[in-house]
Image (cartoon, rainbow, N blue to C red):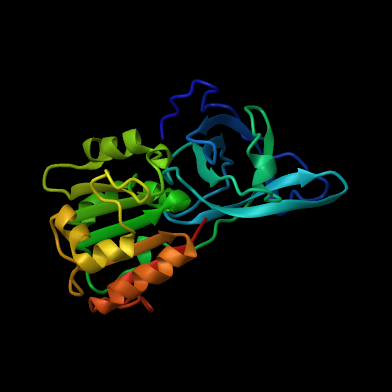
Amino acid sequence: MIDETGNAVASAVSKNLEVDGLDAKYSRETVLSVRRWSDSLFSFVMTRPAHFRFTAGQFARIGLEVTGSAPIVRAYSVVSSPFAETLEFFSIVVPDGAFTSRLKDLKVGDHLLLERIPYGYLTLARYQEPVPQDLWLLATGTGLAPFLSILQDFAVWQNYQHIVLAYSVRTIEELAYVHEINALAATFAEDGGATFQFIPIVTRDSSFALHERLPVLIQSGLLEQSAGIQLDVARSHVMLCGNPQMVDDTRSALKARGLIMNRRGVGNIAVENYW
């Protein structure tokens, strides 16, 4: 993604320094920019070492060094395209959290540890049946991150006929990356490629067009009405990422519509809990 903060350029060199004997597991990376969306949400961009390869939808393990103790490490889905020269992440501030209470004060030039291998299976490679037709990406909060990575891959736009991104937050101030999302179709869609529908949802603002929780919108049919297509067991791939309660409730709502969990490449629904 293009950084608009002007804090630092993306050409800074990754620093793979020895970190108290941890260099076999981690590289030490430099923060290039920090963007604050609200009091509780922020993004940061850091250098990407040449060895770090990942698939869109996967997550990385990021660490903070602690004097006299083992590093504090947490998992973060990658926002960036797999082809980007830098790594971008999207974080919430957890009150009194051991990790984010420190991470929230991040500034350009700070160093973070990056585990050398990526993790996770919230990727499109898991889908074999049904064949790609409609892709539904349903997120709450920072669960948006892996979907932004997925949507920056040209292959996704070429393989699917319709793509729907539904992004649910509590307040309008928490609607992050809206400019970037709106630019996706113009950047990646080609003649004959997928159509794209972005559906923002604000649950604590009754004046907003859609303000119910995702499972409620599925049960009522309003999500499909907004998307202009139907959830269909024969053609829909549905990915869920967000807080565990949303994931559980939305999965149940989808199952009630006849969609099934993806197992060994077969099925409609793939999930990942994420705060």
Res 254 seen here:
yes
In the image as oriented, which residue stretches furthest toward the front? 206
Front residue of 137/86: it is 137
Q: Nearer the viewer, residue 3 or 245?
A: 245
Q: Is residue 40 above or below residue 254?
A: above
Quadrant location of the N terminus? Answer: top left
Label total for image: 0
Left or right of 197? Residue 153 is right
Q: Seen in the image, is 28 located left or right of residue 52?
A: right
- Image: 54 above or below 216: above
Residue 236 quadrant: bottom left
Please name the residue shown 70% across and 41% down the image: 102
Q: Is residue 121 visible?
A: no
Q: Where residue 88 sits in the image (x, y, percent)?
A: 50, 40
Q: Residue at x 67, y 51 (%)?
A: 97
> At which x and y percent is residue 38?
49, 36
Where is residue 105, by image quadrant? top right
* Left or right relative to 46: residue 245: left
- Position of residue 223 relative to residue 185, above or below, is below
Residue at the outermost top position: 6
At a point 85% along the width and 44% down the height, the residue shown is 67
Q: Residue at x 76, y 44 (%)?
A: 65
Q: Nearer the viewer, residue 50 or 65?
A: 65
Q: Which percent across, then down, holds residue 197?
A: 21, 48
